[in-house]
Structure formats: structure tokens, C-alpha cells
Amino acid sequence: MHRTYAVTWQEPLRAPLSGKLELRATGLSLEGSNSTSGSAALLIPYEEFAGMRLAPWGDRLDGRPTLALDRLGRGTLRVASIVAPGVISEIAEGLDARTRQHRRD
């Protein structure tokens, strides 16, 4: 069973979506929706991540601490917790561990 996090996320040039994030065996899973573009689901393989950092103030989602995830050839995905800002560090640690493991395999 995977831990589920309530998040808002945004891909480049798209409207933010709210829903859930899971760190699965093969990649980061996002499922959610918004009022303008409906629902969406993404499964991003860990191998696709090139780096991550905390987004600067001007790049935050709704002013909340935001994790900026650089994707190979796809720009930066921004993720912010809906419920607890501290969850962002937990997501970053889990993502870093899984990304490192997939690069070793």
C-alpha cells in the first residue's frame, strides 16, 4: 500500500490541478482535477526526474511551500501540499530515495 498525499500540482503552461500523489514502485502517480480542464492522471517514471528543489517565493502554488521537480525534456512540475506544508519534505525524501534506487538498478 502506498501513502497518499493531498496535493496541488502544475505542469508547464497548464492550469493547476488538485488531488492525490503517490510514490509507487515504478514512478510518481498524480490524479486530480480542476474546474476548467476536468480530471487528469499522470504516472511519471523515476528515471524522468533530473532534479528537485524548493520553489522560490514567486514560483509557489497559492503561496504554499512548493517542490519544483525538473523532468527530462518536459519542464518543471510544481507540487504543493494541500493539508500540511511539512509533507513536501517527506515527498522530496521519498522521491529522492526512489530516484536514486532506480538509477542504480
Image (cartoon, rainbow, N blue to C red):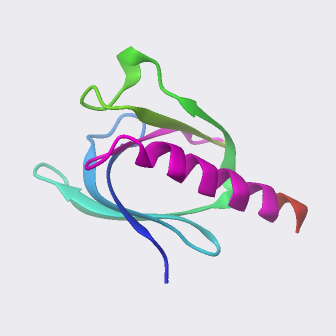
Answer whether residue 62 is magenta in the image.
no
Instruction: Name the residue rendered at 27%, 61% in the picture.
Output: 32
The percent position of residue 17, horizontal first and vertical second, equals 26, 50
Q: Is residue 51 above or below residue 33?
A: above
Q: Position of residue 10 (x, y in %)?
A: 36, 42
Q: Quadrant of residue 14?
A: top left
**Residue at left offset 36%, top offset 26%:** 60
Q: Quadrant of the C terminus?
A: bottom right
* Residue 80 to residue 27: above or below: above
**Horizontal relation, residue 89 to residue 102: left or right:** left
What is the span of residues highlighted in magenta in the rendered image? 73-102
| Image coords of residue 51 (percent x, y) | 68, 38
- Count of labels in the image: 0
Q: Point out the residue furthest to the right here.
A: 104
Q: Residue at x 62, y 50 (%)?
A: 93
Outermost residue, left side:
35
Give whichever of 16, 73 is nearer the camera.
Answer: 16
60, above or below 5, in the image = above
Q: Quadrant of residue 25?
A: bottom right
Relative placement, left or right, of 13 versus 35 is right
**Residue 93 part of the magenta-drawn span:** yes
Q: Is residue 36 left or right of residue 102?
A: left
Q: Residue furthest top?
A: 58
State the residue in front, 96 or 102.
Answer: 96
Would you identify the image quadrant in which residue 78 lies? top left
Does residue 15 appear left or right of residue 2 in this picture? left
- At 52% across and 51% down in the image, what residue appears? 90
Q: Nearer the viewer, residue 59 or 75?
A: 59
